[in-house]
Image: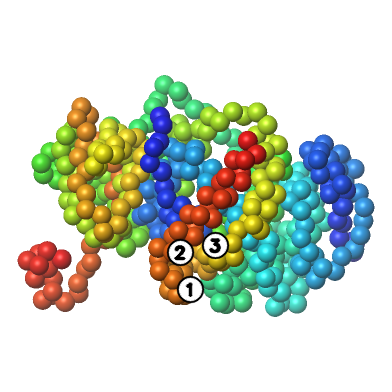
Amino acid sequence: MPTMSLTVSILARTCHNDQKANYGSLSRSSHGVRMKRSDRNLQEQELSNAELSRLLGLVGAERNVEAFETLFRFYSPRVRAFMAMKTRDALLAEELMQETMMSVWNKAAQFDPARGNVSAWIFTIARNLRIDAFRRKRPVFDENDPAFVKDDAPPADVELEERQDAELLRQAMESLPPEQLEVIRRAFFEDVSHSTIAEDMGLPLGTVKSRIRLAFDKLRTSLEGRR
Amino acid sequence: MKIHHHLSDELLLEYASGNLSEGWSLAVATHLALCPECRRTLEAMEGAAGALFDKIKPAPSTSSDSWEAMKARLVAEEVTEKRPPVPAKRSPDHAFVIPEPLRSYLGGDVKDLKWNALGRGAYQIRIPTADKDTQVRLLKIPAGKPVPEHTHDGREITLVLAGSFRDGSDIFARGDVEEADGDLLHTPHATEGEDCICLAVTEAPLKFTSWIVRAIQPILKI
């Protein structure tokens, strides 16, 4: 195999407003601007959701190893950190990270680049593997079940809106008061109950619950504002 | 169907983060199957987790080359899921009362169930889970009758699947969920006209290991 150079297109940023068309043309001509980036840069830099979606789309459509390598270098240190928070075991965290990224590779075709939030999608894969690793069960609904109640919200422009969700959420999260953000961060990453979070933070459980409610009221409002 | 009583953000966040045990999760997932509004909140929560994921302090690899190991696996392993699964055909003439995932836990829909009498015309089916901390039951309460065994301590979630019940001035119908904790004193009654079928998840009764405590437990009603 020839030496791999990281291929990161910066075109996606400039064509942000017409992401879908951009995705189509890029997947045909494969790559735009080539530039090498070191591991460290990629870990700490923020890739836009549009760029991450494009890369994951390439993995799904044509099993593009270079696109996957970029995703791997960006996400693997994050998934490893997420796993290590629960396991406190570096080897196990590494193994669970590898499983997560293998799942990303295998399921990439199921990801719809026009609709999804890549980081949220990868979080759910990592979360589910962490649940499996600890032999817990998490029942889930089935969208294909005849008894499943579909969303009858008007379908017009849903795709456009969903594409903007990741960016809207990111902005809304940044505007949350730090004490609300901290409660949510702990709830997602520390794998403990809300009462444990309350104890650790020296707060009454009621305060933790109200911070959760306030934070999601705000996030919901920011998402509804676009409709 | 319009759902008026939704999951609380706290409960949904526990489910979204993967920290909710199986018994409670069964009620949450079954409500989600019926409630597009809560599914949108769940999606927003997973989006929030994604945004936090981007900001997480990266943990550098301890092994020499993590990517080389990954690349070797990509070559070695066949792609198992290339295309999204084709959705199963819907059969519009077949209406299930109980949605997934609950239907699989029960082994069938309402017409297939074998109920156990609970007294005063009420029936129940215990639903086994691997979760030791919760007690999960499907209840059938005759129209107009109180929801049985309703003195409880600790958390409780009730999800209505058929009929409805009244609690104070609130009416809970199909898809509605009521969350209660030990502080709430309430006596829900099935509304007149139709039997009420609901999923009830409660904290498992405390089990004392000492035979003395066990012997006096019924007397003290603890």
**Image point (30%, 34%), residue name:** B162
Relative to A68, is A29 on the left or the right?
Answer: right
Front one among B133 and A208: A208
Instruction: Tell me the number on the disc at residue A180.
Output: 3
Separation (CA) of disc 1 from disc 2: 9 Å
> Do the residues bearing badges 3 and 1 touch, measured as CB atoms within 8 Å?
no
Front one among B91 and A215: A215
> Do the residues bearing badges 2 and 3 touch, measured as CB atoms within 8 Å?
no
**Image point (77%, 57%), residue name:** A47
Same chain, labels 2 and 3? yes
Relative to B128, is A132 on the left or the right?
Answer: right
Q: In the figure, residue B144 lies in which quadrant?
A: top left
Numbered disc 2: what chain? A
The type of residue carrying mark 2 is Val
> Do the residues bearing badges 1 and 2 touch, measured as CB atoms within 8 Å?
yes
- Residue at numbered disc 2: A208
Instruction: Kindly state the secondary structure of the residue where label 2 is placed.
Output: helix
Q: Residues within 10 Å of mark 1 (few under 14, many from 20)?
A: few
Instruction: Tell me the number on the disc at residue A201.
Output: 1
Decide which of tag 2 and tag 3 comes sooner along the chain: 3
